[in-house]
Image (tube, rainbow, N blue to C red):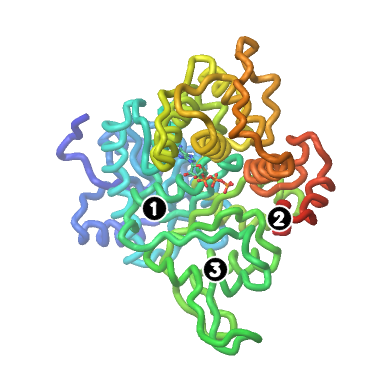
Amino acid sequence: MSRDQSAPDILLVEDEPSLAHLYARLLGAAGWTVATATGAAEARRLLAGEPRAVVLDLNLPDADGMELLQEITGRRPAPTVIVVTVRGSIRTAVDAMRFGAYDFLVKPVASERLTTTVRNALDRSRLIRLVDDLTDGTRDGLGGMIGSAPAMQAVYRMILMIAQSAAPVLITGESGTGKELCAEAIHRFGRRSAAPLVAVNCGAIPQALAESELFGHVRGAFTGATADRVGAVAQAEGGTLFLDEIGELEPDLQVKLLRFTQTMTYRRVGDDGSTQADIRLVCATNRRLAGEVAAGRFREDLFYRVNVLAIDMPPLRDRDDDVVRLARHFLDRFAGEEGKRFEGLTAEAEGLLRSYPWPGNVRQLQNVIRALAVLARPGTIDGATLATFLHAGGADVAAAAPTTAAPAQPDPRLVRPLAELENAAIEAALAAFGGNVTRAARALGIGPATIYRKRGRPGGVDVSE
Ligand SMILES: Nc1ncnc2c1ncn2[C@@H]1O[C@H](COP(=O)(O)OP(=O)(O)OP(=O)(O)O)[C@@H](O)[C@H]1O
């Protein structure tokens, strides 16, 4: 779509004439053309000129700023909107982001912050046009992600749209849906891709060490701190900090993270001074974080801080034929690693892949195909063979298995001790449910206590995390 060459780059909507004049002068000095409106009526008229970005003060004399925002973000093509709010109205800013605003500025606006934010917004509007041209709904992957289902096209579009923004992202989705891959793609397609992406699994670090893991410590800060330690925030400087399983953070660390997101400064453990950080925050959770807030386990203010831009990874069972595409991909890869050759999957096996609910999503599929590549006889994978491996992975496939499947040919070389199969089943179930013993036990049809008991057995599964 060609834009009118005389169209302004930026529409500035600001009811205070002196401020409007000041902002317009700053933006003009940075090389952009600016149209100025002091109210909603004038803004609506000037929008016809198709500006690429709008700087919108939400406090307008003649209209509700939030309504005008929705009108603007509903336009096609939609300009990128930056809202201006007053200090202390962070909630309004968050609402504005939900209605499609790209970023927000808090009054009084520093000149450098204004020009940087507008530059980012214009970059984004250029990118959106590029993405609209590129994503015609037929991408078969993005970054490390494979899949072309409509649910994944929406994910790819979202990643490309938000990659250029500086705002925090919350990636939600069941365990194994690819949240970490999504974070990698956001980093890779963003402006920080030359700097590091540092991932921290908040559920896996012992709480006593969590603060030091994130923010670092100075020598002598606590017993055992024999040297300075660089934390994840410092390692990610200029790049992206990915906090996985953010819902697992203990309350006192939630407070520290909140402070960090508010000021972008942090204090190393044992250090008196604070350090300024320049990172983009991307968080992920497989819990319903809003539910955790309601239950009082996750701070509401932190929730709003991290949940500015949101991407929901669809479960594998909602991705149409991607399950077959992914299975073929994993089979090629793991067969190659094993030096084996498989002819592919029968129609029956593909049918089973489609009908199985995949509670552990792509990770579970990957584990099943890896086991299959290691243990199954080379040739074509039929439904019965696949069903055997789904079963060994701790899943009940009785309901999903095609009734026409022929019984598997028993192969003496594949017979393994029962205890070993049991361990493998428990391990696979724990992996599929992100270490959640209760859910793993339910899927296995046993009580959680049984999983804990097996732990004591020599060679048993370790569920001590
Ligand atoms: N679309 C995909 N294409 C290829 N591989 C994928 C895809 N999605 C996930 N995977 C693979 O599946 C595994 C699990 O993905 P990932 O760790 O990103 O999931 P997750 O949602 O972060 O899981 P958890 O919630 O348990 O942390 C990884 O090995 C990843 O490479």
Label 3 or label 2, whichever lies nearer to me, is: 2
Cα gap from disc 3 to disc 2, whole angstroms: 35 Å
Label 2 or label 1, whichever lies nearer to me, is: 2
41 or 198: which is nearer to us?
A: 198
- Label 1 neighbour load within 10 Å: few <14, some 14-19, many 20+: many
Q: Which residue is mark 1?
A: 187
Question: Is residue 429 depicted above or below 233 in this figure?
Answer: above
Q: Residue furthest front?
A: 412
Going by the numbered disc 3, the residue's amino acid type is Phe
Image mark for residue 462: 2
Tell me which numbered mark, 2 or 1, is placed earlier along the sequence. 1
Question: Which residue is rendered at x = 64% and y = 64% of the image?
Answer: 254
The reply to whether residue 158 is in sight is no
Q: Secondary structure at mark 1?
A: helix
Residue 318: x %, y % from top left: 55, 26
Q: Secondary structure at mark 3?
A: helix
